[in-house]
Amino acid sequence: MAESFTYTVRDKAGREVTGSLEAESAEVLAAKLRQMGYFVVSVEQVRKSIAKKEIHIFGVKVKSDDLTIFTRQFATMINAGLPLIKCLSILAQQTESSALADIIMDCQKEVEAGRSLSEALAKHPEAFTDLYVSMVRAGELGGMLDDVLLRVANQLERDAEIKRKIKSAMTYPVAVLGISVLLLTIMIIFVVPKFSSMFENLGAKLPGFTQMLVNVSHFVGGYGGLIILAFIIGFVIVYRRFKATERGKLTLDRIKLHLPVVGNLFHKTAMSKFSRTLGTLISSGVPILGALEITGETTGNMVITKALEEVRSGVKEGETIAAPLAQAEVFPPMVTQMIAIGEETGALDVMLSKVSDFYDSEVNTAVDGLTSMLEPVLIVFLGGTVGTVVVALYMPIFSIVTKIK
């Protein structure tokens, strides 16, 4: 019965060749390779556990950190001269993500069957984006797969770093707002009714502001609470459906860029990702039209995606990249001018890298400024919200005490 083997050999010119074949035994395959004029370096049997393991969790999203570690280790192994199949086998065993391990093993089987690495990776969009696959394909064609994988790892790390910064900047205000809403809800539903019944027993006439608060408490504590909950659920459903449409996403992304305070941060983040992605693709050897298409799909903002579609149309007709970019309002003059200089000097990838570094720095500054500005505002908001309710509840008490005196 024939078994599957991977082999590494050297041809007469001393070049290393890897592949896989079936044979009755390793000795039979080695003899066959020698008859073909190769110097046999190694012959290894494909493990049945890898060849037959059922891939049962495809579709599970792979974490960005796991993918970054895999990519960087992959680049190191390729650079060290390890055969591609051997690299995949080792990486499948040492990754901490079971989802990624199964995907790597399936890619290994695809490569053993004669497919290229980029073709194998393209079968798993839940782990490898179009950007990732296109760069690997360019690295295979250019014979610089290790260098391209390092660039992909750097890209993933920088994207993850920006996401972490924005997430950390948004966590504090969201937490404070959540606490404010929770405290306000508890006071209106549980505290205000107790004070209301006490005031009724005392026969005190409530001030207008306190009466309004009591009315709100009765409304929320009764059917009004269900109405508010139904409205919130309905709003979320409508929002998600609207966001899922192309028109909806374009509208929301345009609004996002023009929001007060945070809109500038979103804009700078989008410019950073655009310039870094396009520069990385071009430096990796991806054709300019393909690079523009992939960049448009990975910016995460439909306004920029639509603008890059116009740029691609212009480039197809012989225009430069900078000319149609200048017509799109979303791209600042500094970006278009740097790209124009890059095109004129033949160093477009270098200029895009400089633009990316500039906006990375701007994002860091914007995040720090946003955090320092929001902290006192949110503290005042939280204190003001709770304090307003407390004052409204104690106003009748002050009135009663004054009458007694």
Image: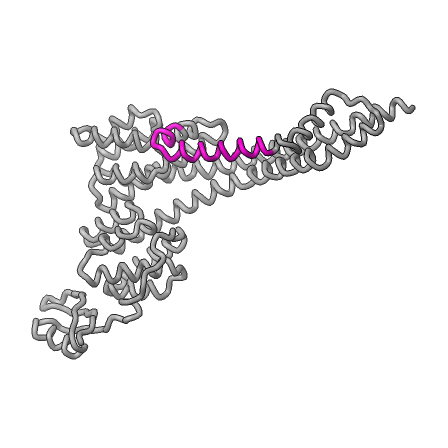
- Who is closer to the viewer here, 8 or 255? 255
Seen from the viewer's position, the closer of residues 235 and 243 is: 235
Who is closer to the viewer here, 372 or 214? 214
Q: Residue at 56% of width from left, 36% of height from top?
A: 372
Kindly report the secondary structure that dominates the magenta region of the rendered protein. helix
The residue depicted at 78 percent of the width and 23 percent of the height is 206
x and y percentages locating residue 260 in the rendered image: 49, 27
Q: Is residue 6 above or below residue 160?
A: below
Left or right of 389: which side holds 271?
left
Residue 90 falls inside the magenta stretch: no
In the rendered image, the residue lying farthest to the top is: 208
Q: Horizontal placement of 228 versus 323: left or right?
A: right
Residue at (71, 30) in percent of width and height: 389
Residue 74 location in percent, x, y?
A: 31, 59
Point out residue 49 in the picture as x, y percentages from the top left corner: 31, 70
Pick the front one: 252 or 88: 252
Query: Is residue 354 something that shows in the picture?
Result: no
What span is in magenta? 226-251
Which residue occupies the extreme bottom position in the image? 27
Q: Is residue 81 visible?
A: yes
Q: Is residue 228 magenta?
A: yes
Give the x, y percent position of residue 6: 21, 69
- Image quarter of the N terminus: bottom left
